[in-house]
Every structure is written in structure tokens, then in C-alpha cells.
Amino acid sequence: MQAFDYLIVGGGSAGCVLAARLSEDPQVRVALLEAGPPDNSVLIQCPAGLAVLAKNGQANWAFETVPQAGLNGRRGYQPRGKVLGGSSSVNAMIYIRGQRTDYDDWAAEGNPGWSYDDVLPYFRRAEHNERGADAWHGSGGPLNVMDLRSPNRFGPVFVEAARQAGHGLNADFNGATQEGVGLYQVTHRNGERCSAAKAYLAPARVRPNLQVITDVRVTRIVTEGHRATGVEFVQAGHVQRLRATREVLLCAGALQSPQLLMLSGIGPADELARHGIALVHDLPGVGRHLQDHPDVVQVVNAPHLKDLFGLSLSGIVRVLRGVFEWRAHRSGMLTTNFAEAGGFIKSRPDETTPDLQLHFVIGKLVDHGRKTVFGHGYSCHVCLLRPKSRGRVTLASADPLAAPLIDPNFLAERDDVDRLVRGFKLMRSIVQQPALAGYAGRELEASARAQTDAQIEDFIRNFGDTIYHPVGTCRMGTGALDVVDAQLRVRGMQGLRVVDASIMPRIVSGNTNAPTVMIAEKAADMIRGRTGAAATAPAEAVAA
């Protein structure tokens, strides 16, 4: 049986970071196992390709939730990246870290080393911000962060409308304060997507001590007593094993990391018994505390605004021209991430920090972009940053190839509903300001007829869903239902850690990709036995 020092399960954002950082030591042998293919599709590298990826399901697990009572019995959509780079290869590339209080709360809940001051050096080490380094931002790190190369003219129009509605402006959501509206920075480099695979893994793959294995399904973690010793996986129909001499590092994400733990006999004893899985370690918190950002979209029809994305003859001609420009210069309309502008606002003035996030999309987005919509227009999302509702990931069966049962329990708490209703009204007030209203767009009927609070709530329950940020199912902490400690070691086990968004004790106030990269950067130091001070050294790109 082939042996490695470290086996990394999952080649997403966290897995790519760990593979690159751990293999910096030439004496350490590292294997990275990913269920999906390599990230060589042009639809991944071209930022606007995400619109096609949303429709064709390429590089996507395309999970669904169980029926959601809070969404009037509908099943929600849960897209997750199934490709090297994971969701960083298929997401909208927005670079957001969250609020200082997010991380200070993590530390206050019994997780030393995870306060904002503790994690900021890791954010900075990961980052190369093209604006330059400062107290909040890094320069020289693997992950390239930049302003959009060829922004659409309607992003600033939305920002001006928000200003007219009374919201402050913010040029850096990851700086001194998060509150305000503005244009998002993105994880791009030279007009292409800068995923974790491109930023971290690609430069490291030339190393002889790093082996990357794609198109394999890990079916269980192999254990000897309470120690993880390897993994079992299926490749081309054959069951194989690899041995880990030091650690197995589980980076399969908030939906599949708990699933794989349970399939391996690590989880709630009653859940495992129900599926006939032999118990290795009773860990009742596995799969609990699922948190996600509930979101609702207002869509505005504006057929006369041809410089917005849309399906029309002129729109197709513009896209074809954009293809030639992107191929020749890596510039033009296809460098968009679609959600070009947005911001962080308070649902009520007395909120201490923003509890809502806005995403302004330069096209009509219906059903997560999966539904074909003709004509031109724009969309505006509002999502709840710190929902109180908690859900769960469980097993559908003992079949390791079956999808997990995903229950975000959306809008189970009344406070979540009330905040989203207030958020929808604030979002609508922005769209109705002169800067946008002057273009004479018309809100689609589904939301336009929702005027009272009760009608808006009904619209949210009929059309709301995730904005793709599941976390918390292998929660870090010291409580009876926590799964990993502050070193991300699985409680009661040896040689096993979880390193991905599932360890978040509470969901961060914003997009979750940058925090996941930070978690893996910090985990790499902990695995290597380095102190937190190591992260304060000047940022270095991942070298071959």
C-alpha cells in the first residue's frame, strides 16, 4: 500500500492551500484526492463562464436540500464545486473576509488563536492585493485580489442609488469597517479567475513530493482503533487504499466532510446504527449546526439597456465580440463576475454592525441562473448575514456514493424572517432611487405585487434560497456537540483533522471563500507545529 505523510481529502479551496503549504517541505510526502476533474475548462478560467457553468452543471455536485418548511416545502439548491479548486473554481469570485466581531466571537466561545487579530496575518499572508499592502492587506501572497478589469457601467449606478437611499460608501469592505456600499474586489489575475487551484496548487504541482489524484471518490477514512491511518477510495470502479503516516486531513466541505466522517463510523451513534455503520467513535455533533445565508432576489426587466447582460440578438453579438476580446487581451465584458457591486447594511439603525449583504447583478438572475430568461435587465440580492436558524447534514444511506441529506432549516426562526423582510424593503428602496429608476426598468411581477410585510414574507418563502455559504457542520469548540478543537483535530481521534468551512463556530458576515483560505493557511502552520508568529512574516508566493 502506498504511503504518504499527509492525505488530503478534497481538492477545494482548503485542500489546495494545504497541499501547497505542506509540500513546501521536501521531506514530506503529500497526496491530494479530488472527486472532480482538473480545472482546465475555459469556462472556469474565463470569469463570465460561471453563467454557463450554472446552466450546464459542469464541475458541480448540484445537491438539493430536503423539503424546507420555511420555504413553503420547496427543495433548495446547493451547488458545490466538483473540480480542482472546489467552489473557488465555480463561484462569483467576490473577496470578502467578514467582520472583526465574527472572529472575536469564535475566540470568545473557547477557541484560542482565532480572534480577528490572530487570523488577520493569515488573510494578509494569503493575499496579493493589486492595490498594494497596508494594515489590512497583503502583497506577494498566492491569492490575487484586484478591482474588476472591465467593469460594467451599471455597478457605479447601483452604488449611487444606494447613496441616494442614505447608505454610506465604502471602497474597501475588508478594511477598517465593512459597512457601506461599493464595488467588490475579486479573485482574478490578468483577466482570469484566480481560484485556489490556480493560486496555490498549480505552482506546487511540479514538486516530486506532491501527488494530485483527480476523479476519485473517497468512501471512508480507514481507522485503527481511534487513529486515522489512511483512506479508501474508488477509482475507475476499483477500490483502493492509501496510508497516512502522520495525518488524514478532511477538506471535503461543510456538506461532505460530516458525511465522510459518519460513513467512517465517526458521528452520532444513533445515526450510524440506523444505517448499519460500525461505530468507531460516538461524536454526536457531526453534521449538526449547519448554517447558511438565506437570500432573496429582486429582478428588474430593462429590455432597452443593451449593455446589461441578456439573451437577445444584440446581446449575443456583444458576447461574441467579448469572446474575441477576452481571448486576445483578457479584457472586456467577459471578465465580469456579474455580481460587480453590493455592500453591507443594517436592517435597523440600532444594529451594532451590518446584518444584511447586497449583491447587484448585471443581468436577470432567476432560479440561480439555471432558468433561461430572455431580454436584458438586472437583479439585486439581499441576504441575511447571521441567521439564527440551524440545520443539519445526515446520511441518506450507508452508500458512500449517495448524496447526503441536507437540511439548512431555512427561516425556522422568526427573527430571520423579520430581518429579511426589512432587508427586502431596503433593497427595493435602493432600486427606486433616481439613479436606477431613471432607466425605467420594471420589477418582475412575482416581487412587484409583494407590497405589505405579509406579502413580502410570502415572496421570500416562495422564491428565497441559499447564496451558497454552508458552514458549521464540524464545529470548532469545547462543547459537547463540537467536533474539532482549536487545532482542528477531531475530538476523540488521533491523526485526523477537519480543515474547511465546516469548522466555523458561527457563519461569517459575508462570502465564505476568503475565510476558508485563511482557515487552511492557519491550519498548515498548526500542522507543521509553527507558532502564530510565523504568519506575521512577509507574505510569500507558493514557490515550486
Image: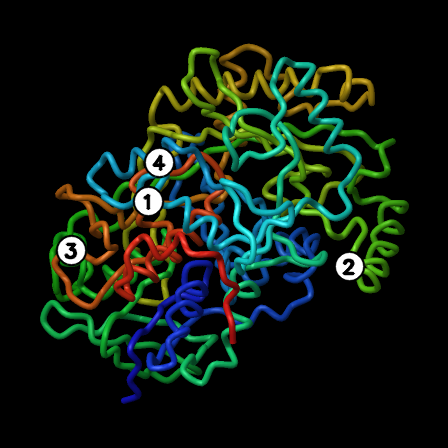
x and y percentages locating residue 120 in the rendered image: 41, 44
The residues tagged by marks 1 and 4 sit, at their Cα atoms, a distance apart of 18 Å
Q: Which mark is residue 409?
A: 4
Labels 3 and 1: the sequence-earlier one: 3
Alpha-carbon span between mark 3 and mark 4: 26 Å
Q: Is the residue marked by circle 3 packed among few (<14), some (14-19), or many (20+) residues within 10 Å?
A: some
Q: Amino acid at mark 2?
A: Arg
What residue is shown with label 3? 491
Label 2 or label 3, whichever lies nearer to me, is 2
Which residue does the image show at 45% across and 20% down from the upper left?
419
Of circles 3 and 4, the one toward us is 3
**Amino acid type of the residue tagged 1 in the rendering:** Met
Determine which of the numbered discs, if any, sits on residue 504 in the image: 1
Label 4 crowd (10 A; few <14 / some 14-19 / many >=20): many
366 relative to 124 in the view: left or right: right
The one nearer the camera, 127 or 343, is: 127
